[in-house]
Amino acid sequence: MKGIEALKKHLGKPQKMILKNEDGTEDEIELDILPLDKYQDMMYLLGKLAVEGEEGISMSKIDKEAGEVMTDLILSTLKQSYPTVDEKDLKRFASTHYFELMTKIFEVNTPSTTPVTDTRVKKQIEDLKKKVKEKDRQSP
């Protein structure tokens, strides 16, 4: 019986994600760990984005295929965390918070490693956000 209790005690737990509102207040959601069948994709992505000889990941290595895998992992996480929410709403939420979700999904699913606590990676994510905003401003 002790083994079963220990196993249940060490199941992956959801992690909180803070969303800032325009008025300065915050909302909080919880993201659950990925289903086991998605870990191959997670390992693929971590391997694809890893920087040899360094801790962390490189955002510059995200190509179309890696982006598609990341999008699938984001949607899988949201579906796992909020199974009763309409998929259309989950997709809109994912589009709105893509980079924050990407970072959080690495944190939720790789608790014993620190791929996104690296300040270099956080800076790369911020740079990507700026580029996306700049493209949005330039679009007619």
Image (cartoon, rainbow, N blue to C red):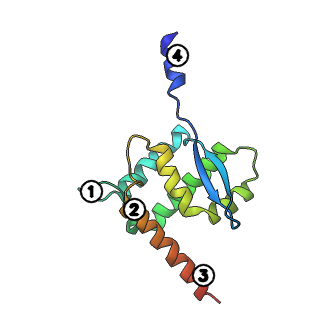
Q: Secondary structure at mark 1?
A: loop
Asked if marks 4 and 2 touch (Cβ < 8 Å), the reply is no
Q: CA distance from mark 1 to mark 4?
A: 38 Å
Residue identified by numbered label 3: 136
Query: In the picture shown, does residue 77 fall above or below 22?
Result: above
Callout 3, which amino acid? Asp
Q: Where 129 sits versus 75, above or below?
A: below
The residue under label 1 is 54
Q: Secondary structure at mark 4?
A: helix
Please name the amino acid that badge 1 sits on: Glu
Residue 40, image quadrant: top left
Determine which residue is flagged by label 4: 4
Q: Earlier in the sequence, mark 4 or mark 2?
A: 4
Asked if residue 123 lies left or right of residue 30, the reply is left
Is residue 78 left or right of 128 when viewed as pictured? right
Please say if 27 is above or below 39.
Answer: below
User: Residue at image x 53%, y 24%?
Assistant: 9
